[in-house]
Amino acid sequence: MRKLRNKITGNLIPVFRRRLSGVDALPQLAVLGLLSGLFTGGVILVFRLAIEWPLEYFLPGDGSESFEELDILTRAILPLAGAVALGLLMHNLATHDRKVGIVHVMERLNYHQGYISVRSALVQFATGVSTVVTGQSAGREGPAVHLGAAISSLMGQWMRLPNNSIRTLVACGCAAAISASFNTPISGVIFAMEVVMMEYTIAGFTPIILASVTAAVVTQAAYGSEPAFSVPPLTMNSLLEIPWIIAIAIIIGVAAAAFIQLIDTTGRHHHRPVLLRLTIAGLLMVPFAIVVPEVMGIGYDTVQFTIDNQLPFWLLLGAGIAKLLITSVTLGLGMPSGVIGPTLFMGATLGGAMGLIGAQILPDMA
């Protein structure tokens, strides 16, 4: 086994590395994309299982998101205890090791050629699982993107690839993570090229789409081919719906601006000790968990209920506003949470509430 490994690292990888430096390196980049998709898909499977298994065992009812069925005392204690535990973990880490999420990936890509450490990946895995399992208002896609970028970057570092190849691998990992999380390969490609790479190139597009499709195939082997959300067929009954759709877009845009502003405002306290900040975040989470338990965890069950028109107006409005407030404040205080899941939750619930208002105004046309 050792001889085989030495032969691979001693003969094949140097040849592969030399060909990557040429102008016709697209086949080699395609191979990197396939490898990135395989490894990232496997890591995302482990990450999702690490979240779902404890919750399926601990939470009453079916599935891994039924925080609403917990008793009031447990709903109050769980996020507070989790926040204190996360605060202790982050307190014992160096400041540069506390950085996690998509923003950290973009920082490493723009200023450090995409080099991400093993320690960074381990910290992201631990904090990403802990925030969701302990009922914080968090998502799993941001941590998943970090993990996908990290495993792909580490693969490139192990192969001693040039910096431009490692940067491409980071983008492949990001696309593969989104694809594996939502079972949507095209959205993973768009996310990687528009948000992470911020450019479209033929040399980058080919390995990224291969990584995205490969990761989707890996997760489909475990979770099936169903998308993250089941959306019924949509029809427009009247052109009078268009002004209301524009109004919904404006209101959700205002909500997004308020979300960003709240994060910036609470983020001004980053000079405070991290244990104090996360403990305060946990305390703030307690009343929300008691009154509006839908905000706990990722909340994709609530998103699906909203799509299926199974929730009343006041619950949609209250849950959307509550998710906006508690997520932005806890993120600003330094909670290592993912933000993609909460933003989907906010958009779905606020949009659903506005849709019910529109149906009341024009019941025969909307």
Image (spheres, grey):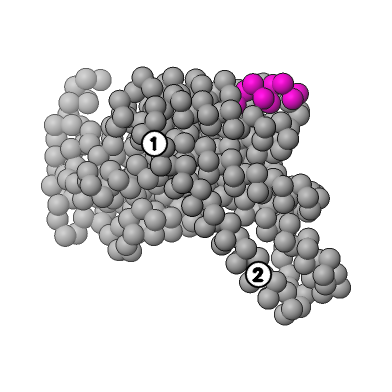
Q: Which residues are magenta?
A: 71-79
Which residue is tagged 1? 270
Q: Position of residue 33 (x, y in %)?
A: 34, 48
Disc 2 residue type (three-letter): Ala
Give the residue displayed 37% in from the left and 45% down from the top. 103
Mark 2 closeness class: few <14, some 14–19, many ≥20 residues within 10 Å = few
Residue 64 place in picture, x, y as percent? 66, 31
How far apart are the two marked residues, 1 and 2, measured between alpha carbons?
36 Å
User: Which mark is on residue 247?
Assistant: 2
Q: Position of residue 303 (x, y in %)?
A: 67, 48
Residue projecting furthest to the right = 364
As drawn, 16 above or below 84: below
Q: Is residue 124 above or below residue 357?
A: above
218 left or right, relative to 245: left
Q: What secondary structure is the stretch in magenta mostly built from? A: helix
Q: Of callouts 1 and 2, which one flags the residue occurring earlier in the amino acid sequence?
A: 2
Relative depth, front residue between 258 and 144: 258
